[in-house]
Image (cartoon, rainbow, N blue to C red):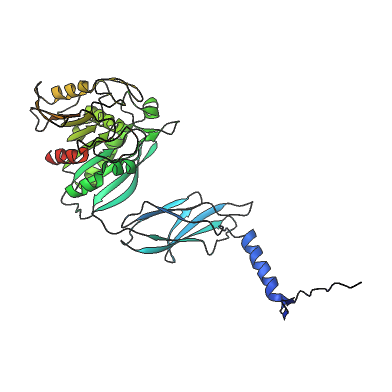
């Protein structure tokens, strides 16, 4: 019976090798797998909110020993430590970057045993080309809540000159970025040199983002969220920072309803507001001074019906109730001058306040932003009117 050959461990593929390197390799691999924090080879850094001068980076928790946790993360750009963050952090905003530039970003984790993941989780992030607008992501604390907003600043802005401050207020279920993209407001704002803040509502138990406009909407109204206080604080902060010459609110749907409420309760802070598919759903409304108003509304809107009644989330009052209240408040006559073109009726009221009140109705428009991006929400946008261009021209005239 033939005996099987015993393979010697120091012979591999017919070549004699020392055992020392193999033993060393086993020890190194054991140290990496069992001690230092580490990410798998398939794990990637996530890059988002890229602008010409900034970007956001996020990451998952690394693999750790079972009896320890991450105590801090170091974030490096091109091999140089930019910031050190608490172990509970999973993202970072990196600013003061150069346009159209690729950066090497590395995140290193340190655990409770003072073990560091070297190398860390690496990736490449490239800033966008320089543009007419610089976008910032910011927060402001109002009461016990930290609120978020997006801020678009003209690239050539100089603080000593002053700028028109505009707040773009998204509708129910929306977000600052969604509102900016759907309306195309950033391009219009850049052309007019506006500073635009896009505040973000709060989410209720169903995850629906909304504003407390009084009678509407979602968890924001039911939970009595102080959205008036949030917008008030945001306006005051930005008016000071940008030496605002005028302050205008532009809202859609539930965001437009909040604009109405702000005009009722904070008339002294704003110089006018534009409502698209909105409604006055707050009482008592007693503006402290005349507030110019532009209302754009579709007559086929079933979410917020022009004549009032059951809608998407509530039973709404007629839009004309709000128009008539501000007509009286602004010292306007009862009979407007009207013009009609392709189903679009523009009613301009003569008021003691310049450009005091204008109502535009569109015969076939649904709830979606007229002339905006078709997102499949609120029906198909009407093409009979470019609401963004209309609002821009009106706001510039104030």
Residue at 25% from the left image edge and 46% from the top image edge = 186
Where is residue 24 shown, x and y percent of the image? 67, 71
Specify whether residue 389 is in view.
yes
Q: Nearer the viewer, residue 338 or 17?
A: 338
Where is residue 309 shown, x and y percent of the image? 30, 19
Rendered view: 135 above or below 383: below
Q: Quadrant of the C terminus?
A: top left
Furthest residue in direction right, as rendered: 1
Where is residue 313 shown, x and y percent of the image? 36, 25
Residue at 18% from the left image edge and 24% from the top image edge = 323
Rendered view: 23 above or below 298: below
Where is residue 152 shown, x and y percent of the image? 27, 48
Rendered view: 346 above or below 18: above
Furthest residue in direction bottom, as rendered: 16
Q: Is residue 48 left or right of residue 294?
A: right
Q: Nearer the viewer, residue 56 or 124?
A: 124
Specify whether residue 143 is in view.
no
Q: Residue 372 occupies which quadrant of the picture?
A: top left
Q: Nearer the viewer, residue 137 or 289?
A: 137
Q: Quadrant of the N terminus?
A: bottom right
Residue at 61% from the left image edge and 62% from the top image edge = 32
């Amino acid at each position: 019976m033939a005996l099987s050959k015993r393979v010697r461990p120091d012979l591999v593929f017919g070549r004699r090798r020392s055992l020392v390197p193999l033993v060393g390799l086993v020890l190194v691999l054991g140290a990496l797998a069992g001690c230092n924090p580490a990410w798998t080879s398939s794990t990637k850094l996530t890059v988002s909110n890229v602008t010409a001068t900034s970007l956001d980076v996020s990451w998952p928790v690394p693999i750790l020993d079972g009896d320890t946790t991450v105590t801090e993360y170091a974030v490096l750009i091109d091999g140089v430590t930019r910031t050190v963050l608490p172990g509970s952090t999973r993202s970072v905003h990196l600013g003061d970057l150069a346009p159209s530039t690729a950066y090497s970003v590395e995140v290193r984790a340190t655990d409770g045993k003072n073990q560091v993941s070297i190398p860390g989780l690496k990736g490449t992030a490239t800033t966008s080309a320089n543009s007419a607008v610089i976008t910032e992501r910011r927060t402001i604390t109002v009461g016990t809540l930290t609120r978020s907003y997006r801020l678009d600043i003209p690239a050539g802005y100089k603080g000593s000159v002053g700028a028109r401050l505009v707040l773009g207020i998204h509708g129910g279920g929306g977000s600052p970025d969604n509102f900016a993209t759907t309306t195309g407001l950033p391009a219009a704002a850049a052309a007019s040199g506006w500073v635009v803040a896009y505040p973000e509502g709060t989410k209720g138990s169903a995850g629906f983002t909304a504003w407390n406009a009084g009678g509407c909407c979602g968890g924001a109204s039911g939970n009595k969220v102080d959205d008036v206080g949030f917008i008030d604080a945001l306006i005051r902060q930005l008016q000071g920072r940008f030496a605002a010459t005028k302050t205008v609110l532009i809202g859609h749907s539930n965001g437009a309803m909040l604009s109405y409420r702000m005009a009722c309760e904070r008339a002294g802070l704003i110089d006018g507001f534009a409502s698209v598919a909105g409604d006055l759903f707050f009482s008592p409304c007693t503006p402290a001074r005349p507030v110019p108003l532009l209302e754009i509304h579709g007559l086929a809107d079933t979410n917020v019906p022009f004549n009032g009644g059951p809608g998407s989330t509530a039973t709404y009052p007629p839009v004309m109730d709000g128009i008539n209240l501000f007509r009286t408040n602004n010292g306007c006559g009862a009979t407007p001058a009207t013009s009609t073109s392709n189903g679009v009726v523009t009613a301009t009221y003569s008021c003691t306040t310049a450009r005091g009140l204008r109502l535009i109705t569109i015969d076939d428009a649904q709830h979606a932003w007229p002339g905006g991006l078709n997102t499949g929400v609120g029906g198909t946008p009407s093409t009979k009117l470019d609401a963004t261009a209309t609002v821009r021209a009106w706001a510039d005239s104030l």
